[in-house]
């Protein structure tokens, strides 16, 4: 995140002697991105973070592809994904390409027996149902319905859930996820016309420092495989850090919609950017106020991007037969638009309660076997007048 954050205790100067009460040294680690050119954090451990005891094995976690090349629009019924006890096993990738995995998860239990680290990707977790605490080696974040949790690659984490009723929409990005550049000034500060600002971004607030030795399993995702690595020191043993690279939370309910006299295009809803896809938030808002405006969107062609909409809550004005938890895929190359009747229905309406997350990818998405399990395959004909 492009603003400075400090938690715990750190020495006056970086790369200098920093002593524990017993006179021995803390162990400094630079946690950086884009080689040494990106955002970074300097943290201080009780023990060396390099003490690998054993690599117990690995397994392939890459999704099984059902449709590699696709031109069909789909609707996936996300709540049909079955709840599973384990967090990692509960994650089902539905759409994928070389830049991004889009997954659904309904984990019932908190991560207890292991820590998790994604070495390939930044993870964006959208909390549709459930609440709890994201625990990381850089501090903890409380989460609830409507939160985006941005977890930079390399962050070691656990999820503590308050109950068994959890539904997550997950975007796993091989490209770094940032806030949109056009909303930031030369210095990185969010500008006045940005739909959210630094005040809306919640930073880690509790630092757990466990100076323990033993056997600590970290499941590390790298190149699509999960490696079980056993470390000799507790992964959450940081006494302090400062810098720009850390997990944060942002609530979709804090996104301030941009509206106009006539229909505003999707970029006004943009919340995050990468160089491979964008993420937008559609939130409750007043409709267009030109006396003859049509609030429903016009037909449009995604000639060079696949459009994924995850429907969260409210009434989805432009679609018929869409419910919370559904995902629509409108692939590049063909036009899509409001369902029959939706344009007429929208005229004269003054506001919408819709809540949805959109991911537009610049490369085509492949449809996975897990996605085929939750679709009837008929959605592509839903624009016909019957
Ligand atoms: Fe669209």
Image (cartoon, helix red, strand yellow):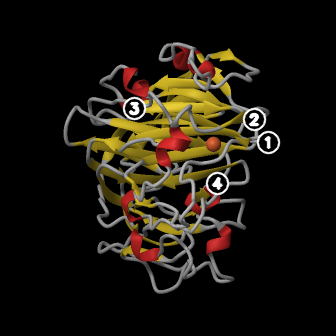
136 over 254 or under it: above or below: above
- In the image, what residue occupies the spot 54% across and 79% down? 14
Mark 4 and mark 2 lie on one chain; the one further toward the N terminus is: 4
Which residue bears the numbered disc 1?
A: 304
Check disc 3: other Cα within 10 Å, few if <14, some if 14-19, many if 20+: some
State yes or no: discs 4 and 1 in contact (Cβ < 8 Å): no
Q: Judge left or right: residue 32 versus residue 12.
A: right
Q: Position of residue 44 (x, y in %)?
A: 45, 67
State yes or no: discs 2 and 1 in contact (Cβ < 8 Å): yes
Q: Position of residue 76 (x, y in %)?
A: 50, 24
Q: Judge left or right: residue 328 versus residue 240.
A: right
- In the image, what residue occupies the spot 54% across and 30% down? 227
Provide the secondary structure element on which disc 2 rests.
loop
Which residue bears the numbered disc 4?
A: 176
Check disc 2: other Cα within 10 Å, few if <14, some if 14-19, many if 20+: many
Mark 4 and mark 1 lie on one chain; the one further toward the N terminus is: 4
Which is more foreground, mark 1 or mark 3?
3
Query: Which quadrant of the figure contains the C terminus?
Result: top right
Q: Position of residue 152 (x, y in %)?
A: 54, 54
Which is more foreground, mark 3 or mark 4?
3
Give the alpha-carbon distance from disc 1 to disc 3, as whole Å: 27 Å
Which residue bears the numbered disc 2?
A: 332
Give me the disc on residue 323.
3
Give the alpha-carbon distance from disc 3 to disc 4, as whole Å: 31 Å
Provide the secondary structure element on which disc 4 rests.
loop
Q: Quadrant of residue 192?
A: bottom right
Provide the secondary structure element on which disc 1 rests.
loop
Name the one closer to the observer, 386 or 352.
386
- In the image, what residue occupies the spot 64% across and 30% down? 96
Provide the secondary structure element on which disc 3 rests.
loop
């Amino acid at each position: 995140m492009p603003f400075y954050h400090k938690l715990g205790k750190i020495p006056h100067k970086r790369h200098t002697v920093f002593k524990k009460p017993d006179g021995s040294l803390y162990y400094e680690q630079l946690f950086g991105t884009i080689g040494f050119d990106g955002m970074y954090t300097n943290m201080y451990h009780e023990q060396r973070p390099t003490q690998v005891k054993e690599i117990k094995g690995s397994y392939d976690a890459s999704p099984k592809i059902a449709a590699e090349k696709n031109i069909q629009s789909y609707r996936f019924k996300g709540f049909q994904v079955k709840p599973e006890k384990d967090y990692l096993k509960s994650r089902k990738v539905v759409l994928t390409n070389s830049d991004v995995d889009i997954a659904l998860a309904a984990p019932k239990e908190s991560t207890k027996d292991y820590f998790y680290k994604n070495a390939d990707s930044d993870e964006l977790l959208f909390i549709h149902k459930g609440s709890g605490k994201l625990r990381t080696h850089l501090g903890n974040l409380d989460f609830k319905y409507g939160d985006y949790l941005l977890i930079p690659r390399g962050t070691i984490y656990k999820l503590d859930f308050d109950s068994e009723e959890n539904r997550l929409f997950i975007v796993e990005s091989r490209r770094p996820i940032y806030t949109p550049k056009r909303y930031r000034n030369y210095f990185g500060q969010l500008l006045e016309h940005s739909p959210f600002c630094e005040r809306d971004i919640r930073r880690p607030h509790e630092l757990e420092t466990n100076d323990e030795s033993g056997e600590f399993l970290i499941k590390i995702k790298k190149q699509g495989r999960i490696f079980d690595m056993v470390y000799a020191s507790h992964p959450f043993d940081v006494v302090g850090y400062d810098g720009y690279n850390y997990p944060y939370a942002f609530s979709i309910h804090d996104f301030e919609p941009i509206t106009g006299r006539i229909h505003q295009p999707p970029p006004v809803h943009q919340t995050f950017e990468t160089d491979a896809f964008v993420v937008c938030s559609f939130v409750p808002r007043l409709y267009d106020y030109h006396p003859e405006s049509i609030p429903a969107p016009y037909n449009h062609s995604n000639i060079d991007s696949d459009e994924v909409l995850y429907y969260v809550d409210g009434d989805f004005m432009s679609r018929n037969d869409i419910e919370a938890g559904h995902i629509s895929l409108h692939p590049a190359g063909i036009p899509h638009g409001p369902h029959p009747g939706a344009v007429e229905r929208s005229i004269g309406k003054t506001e919408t309660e819709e809540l949805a997350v959109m991911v537009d990818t610049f490369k085509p998405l492949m449809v996975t076997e897990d996605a085929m399990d939750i679709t009837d395959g008929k959605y592509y004909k839903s624009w016909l007048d019957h």
